[in-house]
Image (cartoon, helix red, strand yellow):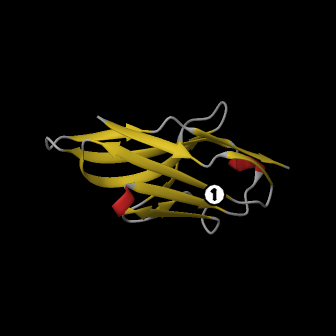
Amino acid sequence: QVQLVESGGGLVQAGGSLRLSCAASGSIFSINAMGWYRQAPGKQRELVASGGRTNYADSVKGRFTISRDNAKNTVYLQMNSLKPEDTAVYYCNAVVTSTLGYVYTYWGQGTQVTVSS
């Protein structure tokens, strides 16, 4: 089993910054990819940023930056110039090859980001 533990969410004023972290632990042979998704109330979950061939949602380009510390199995999302429309639950996602050679997709528990106007 693999666990993804997120941290760093909270309440911030528009224009502010937050940094999300997601640490993976467990039966990990390798992490193929890590990324961030978000889900606002009444909306579908959407991709925010993915690593590897780095990709960002158009709505966050130039404001959010994804990075990864391979030694710590941790992915970060630096969010600057936050807007009220960034308010959502943010989920970490990881595609992992287990120690037995199987590939699974895991999700974190989610962390709330609220941006006030």
Vertical side of 109 occupied by 68: above or below: below
- The residue depicted at 17 percent of the width and 44 percent of the height is 99
Q: Position of residue 71 (x, y in %)?
A: 34, 62
- The residue depicted at 41 percent of the width and 63 percent of the height is 69
**Foreground of the two, 6 or 44:** 6
Q: For residue 90, what is the image quadrant?
A: top right
Vertical side of 91 occupied by 54: above or below: below
- The residue depicted at 42 percent of the width and 45 percent of the height is 93
Question: Of all residues shown, which one is farthest toward the bottom?
Answer: 62
Question: Of all residues shown, which one is farthest toward the left?
Answer: 100
Q: For residue 88, what is the image quadrant?
A: top right
Q: Is residue 72 left or right of residue 30?
A: right
**Foreground of the two, 94 or 19:** 19
Question: Of all residues shown, which one is farthest toward the right?
Answer: 117
On the rendered image, what quadrant is the N terminus found in?
A: top left
- The residue depicted at 62 percent of the width and 34 percent of the height is 43
Q: How many marks?
A: 1
Q: Position of residue 11 (x, y in %)?
A: 75, 45
Label 1 neighbour load within 10 Å: few <14, some 14-19, many 20+: few
Question: Of all residues shown, which one is farthest toward the top?
Answer: 42
Helix, strand or loop status at disc 1? loop
Q: Position of residue 52 (x, y in %)?
A: 36, 63
Q: Position of residue 112 (x, y in %)?
A: 65, 39
**Amino acid beneath label 1:** Ser
| Residue occupied by mark 1 | 59
